Image: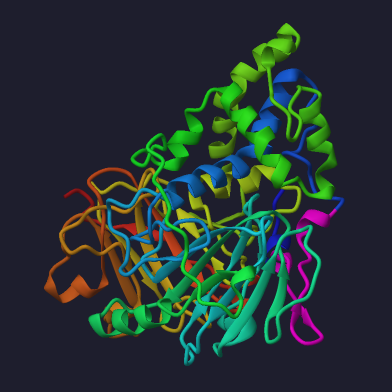
Amino acid sequence: MNVTRRIFAAGAATIPFVGAGLPICRARATEQDAPIIGSQAAADPLELAIDAYIYGYPLVTMELTRRVLTNVVAPEGKGAPMGQFASMREYPNAKFRAVTAPNADTLYSSAFLDVGQEPHLLTIPEENGRYFLMPMLSAWTNVFTVPGKRTTGTGPQTYFIAGPGWSGSVPSGAKLIQAPTNLIWILGRTYCTGTPEDYKAVHALQDRYRLIPASATGKTYTPAARRVDPSIDMKTSVREQVNRMDATTYFNLLASLMKDNPPALADGVPVAKMASLGIVPGQSFDPASQPAAIRAAIEQAPKEAISRIMGHFKDTGNHVNGWTFTTDGGDYGKDYLQRALITAIGLGCNLPQDAVYPTTTVDAAGRKLNGNSKYVMRFAEGELPPVNGFWSVTMYDADYFFVDNPINRYSVSPRDALKANPDGSVDLFIQAESPGAHHESNWLPAPSGPFVLMMRTYWPKDTLLNGSWSPPPVTRSTSASL
């Protein structure tokens, strides 16, 4: 994948509003000139099978995520039944394993909907200027619309969310959002400082985020009682569940899911390639009916594809001061490998206009980050991340989950009352042990082993999007060994 600075200028699709606020979704999936899968055309059964696996990875991952997060009787913690909001009431901790690369800056309000059965109404209350966004993801993980402070303001709002085949009348006072797939995921985020007072204020807003089926409009609505499915694995991370699937199970699930969540029209080439392997939307997949070469390729595909997906990390985006800096997230067109990578390490990724996530696993000298060393990240005076929203630096272990630490701090940001140096610069101390009471406000605790750093820059300014601002390097201190 040949990625240049064009990614900073182009970004992902915007969602303009016309007329009385009707959202028009112009997804990059309509592009005709993007690469298909990687830079080379598949020419043999193994390449076909690897490409098919990569192409379907987001859809399969979304389905398993849906199963885990909706397998509850009533909303509780991170889970809620279909069609209901699960509102996180405090920041996730190191035990959280439902989604890779969670954030500790906003409180999630998450809901899975089947808008193929019937449309739903979403009501958002007056936010009084607070930063929030309600991105909606298709079953293929593309963000297709984003109500929120950046796009629609912070006043009260009502949306009528319909499936791709719906037609009819929109209730008075609501704006139509027509989803590209029947399954959608609303992954709302509301900024919160984490203080008891602000938790209380955000909880009051979350309690007023409301979803009802269209048939309940104007009526008193109480969701039906739900049952827990004991066959669903609620302990193993979703990524691990997907990655350990055998090929037959994986491709059968993919074929089944594509019936109700069909590929984009622009995806005709990969769909045709899958069909040549016997993988057809809505039909059972039986590798035994295929020639020996295809059977062997199908069996090998998961291991090879997963390696290719995770290996793409080093090739994606620009590499600046040790950070991988890309705006190619949230909507992927035909870049299926990028889509699979983001699914694996950052499911629920926003559009770049809403958030950019510079990430690093190395220090300024290219050495792997490890908690056996101490690091400093220095922002020169006036060079803190340029955002209209907010920014933070988050600590993850090598698997992109939070790191347990004595002060329960998983990210560091201005809300920690960062202390500046006499020259106006700001140092972040990244290490396993406390840097001392004077520097503790600027401390991001690290594990004893390898780790990953991710910046979150919400509502980034143009200087960040066009690449003229870059994150500073992570420098190992001279007293590196603890």
**Along the line of sight, the residue nearer the viewer: 219 or 279:** 219
Q: Position of residue 355 (x, y in %)?
A: 55, 69
Q: Position of residue 247 (x, y in %)?
A: 59, 23
Residue at left offset 22%, top offset 74%: 441
Residue 64 visible in the displayed image? yes
**Along the line of sight, the residue nearer the viewer: 50 or 480:** 50
Q: Looking at the image, is 340 positioned above or below residue 422? A: above
Q: Position of residue 135 (x, y in %)?
A: 58, 68
Q: Looking at the image, is 116 positioned above or below residue 292? A: below
In the image: residue 71, left or right of residue 116: left
The single residue placed furthest to the right in the displayed view is: 32
Residue at left offset 27%, top offset 53%: 94
Residue at left offset 73%, top offset 29%: 283
Quadrant for the N terminus in the image = top right
Residue 1 visible in the displayed image? no
Asked if residue 24 lies in the magenta stretch, the reply is yes
Give the residues in magenta.
Answer: 9-31
